[in-house]
Image (cartoon, rainbow, N blue to C red):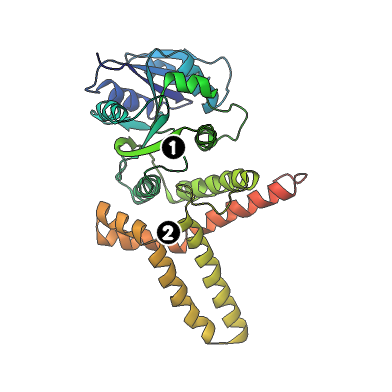
Amino acid sequence: METYISIIIPNYNGSATIGRCLAAASSSRYAPFEIVVVDDSSTDDSAEIIGRYPCRLIRLNKRSGASSARNAGARNSTGGILFFIDSDCLIQVDTLAILKTAFDRHDRSTTVLGGTYTALPDDNDFFSTFQSIFVSYFETKEREPDYLATHALAIDSAVFKKSGGFSEDFFPILEDVEFSHRLRRAGYRLVMDPRILVRHVFRFTLLKSLRNAFRKSMFWTLYSLRAGDLLSDSGTASRELKINGLSFVLIISFVAVFLFSRERLLLLLVPLTCLINAAVNSGLVSAFSRARGSFFALVATAYYVLLYPLPVLAGAIVAVMRHFLRGVRI
């Protein structure tokens, strides 16, 4: 008899994507499974859209956040395996079957499985494609990573219950990172299986890409300062991203000091810094190339090196200020 899987989807004002998310989930070739959607007191027509699909709808009376929604979904699920995704993710027709096969190779009582985004997103624009490749590459870099993301996280229902679930008194994002770290401290293995895939709907523009980088950087830096692991190599908060940011700061500093001192040696340090940064980030550049070809890789790398560090660094600076100047409102 096949293991019953519960797909748990939190939703808040997700009318633009929840229908496609549920259509994709409903098309799974695996059986048996159920879909549990928790609506976090949406103000749009999400509930009406959700009602068109074969799923269980749980409505929260007030806005409580994604962690509360996921925990409510778990409490109202009947599956032996809980598979958490987001309302803007499209699971593939074979995702659940791959997930079940992957769990067959592990002890469900001690192992939690994760997947990631497909390299190419549902959107075809540059910024969405950049983000999907970026996330996919860094999340699958390690077989046993630092964390597993809730856009594709599978866990035994008994293990989830024993863990206490997601923290409901946490930042508005990164609850999956905190949950993963708590599981690791409790002795569970986190295993990344890059075959467990969801296709993400980003709809990113330049502004949304930069805003996302700022927000993620700010909250991740805050969390890392509190956890004491600011320099750790952790998924999308990777060593490569941190070196990319440092490279950006050094290049700006070399150019600025040169303009003041006219010391030409400083300009020679610019290409050297670029070469070191390119070597460290060669895996990401290769991922760009594999997904969309050499021209895309060139443009994406230029964006990553020349502009993307700005919101990342800005977010980190704001986080440091918030951490050390608790009385200052930012």
Residue 43 shows in this picture = no
Image coordinates of residue 271 in percent, x first then y, are 44, 76
| Mark 1: few/some/many CA within 10 Å (<14, 14-19, 20+) | many
Helix, strand or loop at label 2? It is helix
Question: Does 109 sit above or below residue 259?
Answer: above
Q: Which mark is residue 304?
A: 2
Which residue: 43% across, 19% down? 157
Q: Is residue 23 left or right of residue 146?
A: left
- Residue 168 against residue 270 in the figure, above or below: above
In the displayed structure, would residue 216 be above or below residue 163? below
Query: Which of 191 and 21 lies nearest the eye of the viewer?
Result: 191
Judge from the rendering whether residue 129 lies leftward or rightward of residue 41; answer left or right: left
Residue at 36% from the left image edge and 56% from the top image edge: 284
Q: Residue at x 24, y 57 (%)?
A: 293
> Is 118 in front, or is 158?
158
Real-space CA distance between mark 1 and mark 2, rounded to the nearest whole angstrom: 23 Å
Q: Say which residue appears at 41% left-offset and 63% top-offset.
A: 280
